[in-house]
Amino acid sequence: GQQLNQSPQSMFIQEGEDVSMNCTSSSIFNTWLWYKQDPGEGPVLLIALYKAGELTSNGRLTAQFGITRKDSFLNISASIPSDVGIYFCAGRSTSGTYKYIFGTGTRLKVLA
Amino acid sequence: NAGVTQTPKFQVLKTGQSMTLQCAQDMNHNSMYWYRQDPGMGLRLIYYSASEGTTDKGEVPNGYNVSRLNKREFSLRLESAAPSQTSVYFCASSEIGQISGANVLTFGAGSRLTVL
């Protein structure tokens, strides 16, 4: 089946540092989504990407749809304590219709 | 503006018991989904319903059944619960189409199920 590798699995960073995480797929995707999940809550959409090469920002967050259409990146600039949580990527294949595949998540901890 | 509502939030079952998780969305979305989340595994698709009247298996459908009751509601049933079904279950919905901004998944808050 399709594989979606997300890295790193976890990160401990100092407040104010920049954060980078990425997802790589074994197949081509036509949509990439990035979500954040707080403890005890459902994932909340951060950024959606629809075109190869697309670069989209949402405040301090920037995500890119890789040129190969098999990867995506999320950057968080100047991290703050409320950035703590689990970040998930999700992709939708060109051959699929409504099914999204999720990465295993990046657990972010910010040290004040 | 409730979005996606799941009930119950927490449930403890004994092995072999049955139960139904309920999900309702008020965004007039066509597609609805059930995912399960296990530590280190991300979110895995159990079943989805592309539109009212249709359901399809996802990645991990064994041991589950679903019903798309109407456009708003999509339920997940465990007929004979097993400890391996201990997990957090998320319902999601989405619109369909090629317009940018469509196709994103909106999630409920989750239902935490423990099977003893």
Image (cartoon, coloured by chain):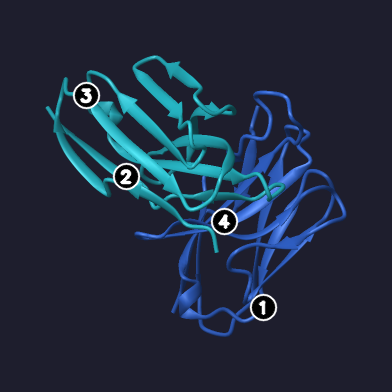
Chain colours: A cyan, B blue
Q: Residue furthest bottom?
A: B16
Q: Amino acid at mark 3?
A: Asp
The residue carrying mark 4 is B35
At a point 15% along the width and 24% down the height, the residue shown is A15
Q: Amino acid at mark 4?
A: Tyr
Front residue of this view, candidates A103 and B111: A103
Query: Left of A47 or right of it: where is B78?
Result: right
Q: Amino acid at mark 2?
A: Thr
Q: CA distance from mark 4 to mark 2?
A: 18 Å
Q: CA distance from mark 1 to mark 2?
A: 33 Å
**Looking at the rendered structure, which numbered label has been put on residue A18?**
3
Q: Position of residue B115 (x, y in %)?
A: 47, 75
The residue carrying mark 1 is B79
Instruction: Say above or below: A71 vs A54.
Output: below
Q: CA distance from mark 4 to mark 3?
A: 31 Å
**Looking at the rendered structure, which numbered label has been put on residue A106?**
2
On the same chain, marks 1 and 3? The answer is: no
Question: How would you rate the neighbour count of disc 2 (Cα within 10 Å): few for under 14, some for 14-19, many for 20 or more?
Answer: many
